[in-house]
Amino acid sequence: MSVPAVVIAAPASGSGKTTVATGLIGALRGAGHRVAPFKVGPDYIDPGYHGLAAGRPGRNLDPVLVGMERVVPLYRHGAQGCDLAVVEGVMGLFDGRIDENQAGPIAAGSTAQVAGLLGAPVILVVDARGHSQSLAALLHGFATFDSTIGLGGVILNRVGSERHDHVLRAACDRVGLPVLGSLPRMSELEVPSRHLGLIPAVEHGAAATAAVDAMTDLVAAHVDLRAIASLAHTTVAGPIWDPAMELRAHSAAHTTIESLPRGGADTSRVAEACTEKPEFAPVIAIAGGPAFTFGYAEHRELLIAAGAQVVVFDPLHDELPTGTAGLVLPGGFPEEHAADLAANTLLLAQVAEQTGRGMPVHAECAGLLYLTRSLDGHAMAGVVDATAEFGPRLTLGYRDAVALNDSPLWRAGERVSGHEFHRTRLVATGPDTPAWGWHAGGERIREGALVHRVHASYLHTHPAGNPRAVARFVAAAAEYTHTRATT
C-alpha cells in the first residue's frame, strides 16, 4: 500500500507554495503525522526548508532528470516509514519544460505531470492580492484545463481582510472547490532571497528554523489539517526504488578497472563499473556546509550502495578527509563565500595535489567554480584553466547533453538530461577538454572541463537518473586507492 499524498500547486510562481507546503509539513507533523516531503523539479533550496519541517530529508521528483519511470519508485522510496506525503510543485501547475513540439496540455517536468503520475489530488494555492469575484474564472480554467488532474481544494494566501475572505470563498463556491485554508498577509514570514531564490536553510541557520516554525504556526492556525489529511491519496503501486538493485540493473558485465592515463581526459579510457562492490570501501568526500548546499539524498545512497564510504566535509574550514579517494563538489553558492574558501589554502593545495595525481572528481556548478584559478578575484584550486565571475544574467533551463569524451563518470557519446541554474560565468578560459556538448537556439554549445580524472561542469545531473555513472565513479576511486597504495 502506498503512502497517500497531496500536491501543493499554484497558478504561477510567487503565489506562496513554499510557505504553505513547508508550514503544512510542519503542522501535520505537529498533529502526529509522519510526513514525507517532496519537491517537483530540480530545486535544491525548498527541500532544505521541507526537511527542517519534516525532520527527514526533503527529496525531489523530476521526470526530466530521472525519467518518468522512476518517479513513482523514488516517491515510494522516499515515503517509507511515513503515513502522509506533501509534494510541493514548481512554478505554475502546468508549467514545465518548454518544448515547441509538446503534445497535449501536460508539460514534461510540470507539477501536473507529477500529480498525474502519483494519482494524487492537487491543492491550489492562490495569491489573493488583487483577486475578487473573478477568482472563480481563474479556478474554473485550472479545474477544466485537463480532466486527468483533480483539484481537491484551494488555499487562499495573503488575504487582506474578513470581507476579502468572504468574497473569495464565494468565488470558490461558484466553481465547486472547497476552501481548505485562508492565510492572512504576514510580511514577517518572508524568507530572505538572493539571485537564485531563497537563501538555503543551511546558510540561514537559526533564522531558517524560526521561519519554518512561523510557517508551521500560521498553517496550523488557518488551514483545515483534518480535511487535507482526509483528502490525501495516491493510486501508485509497483516497485520501491532501491539503490543496490538500481546499480545492478544498470551495470554492465564484470570487467577489470583500467587505469586512466594521467595525460588528459581526451585520450582516457574508463571501464564499466562491475556489479560487485570493491574489495574495500573507497572514501568519497562530499563537500557540504554553507557554500555547497545543492544535492540529492539519493546520491549518497547510491555511492554507499556502490561500495563507497561517504564523508561530508565543509571546505570553508576543513581539510580533505583522511584517505579521500574520490571527491564530489556539488552545487551551491561559492560566490557568497569566496573569500573564506580562498582562505582555506591547505584544502585548496590538497585538492590541486590529489587531482594532479589522478584522484577522480565530480564537480557541478559550485564545484566547477571552486576548481577554477579564481572566483571574483579570490584564488581557488587552479585545477580548471579558467577564471570565474558573477555574471549579468541568470542561466536557467534543462539541457539534453552528450558526453564529448570518456571520464570517470560517463563514456563519450552517452546522453544525459541535466539542468543549468547559475548566475556566474567562466572567463579567460584555457584549452581544457570540454565535458559536454548540446545545441541551444541553433548554437553549438561546448561546456565544462575534463582535466586528468576531473569532470567539472555547470550542468546539474540527478544521480538516480545516472546510476551507472555513480558506479563508475566509485570504481575509479577504488582503483585510485589501490594505485596510491602500491606506489
Image: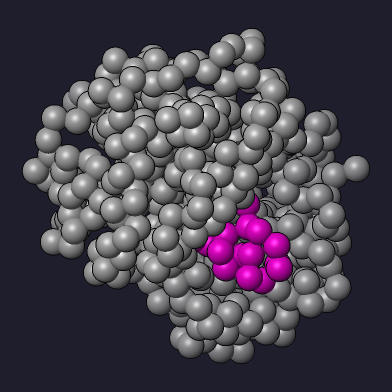
Above or below, 396 against 469 in this view is below
| Magenta highlight range | 45-60
**Residue at 16% in and 43% down:** 386
Residue at the far left in the pictured view = 428
Asked whether 79 falls inside the magenta stretch, the response is: no
Q: Quadrant of the C terminus?
A: top left
Here the colouring is one colour
Viewer-proximal residue among 324 and 435: 324
Viewer-proximal residue among 225 and 482: 482
- In this view of the protein, can residue 150 be seen by the observer? yes
Residue 323: image location, x then y, percent = 51, 47
Q: Quadrant of the N terminus?
A: top right
**Residue at 41% in and 48% down:** 329
Above or below, 351 against 103 in this view is below
Instruction: Left or right? Give the position of 331 relative to 231.
Output: left
- In this view of the protein, can residue 175 be seen by the observer? no
Instruction: Left or right? Give the position of 466 relative to 447.
Output: right
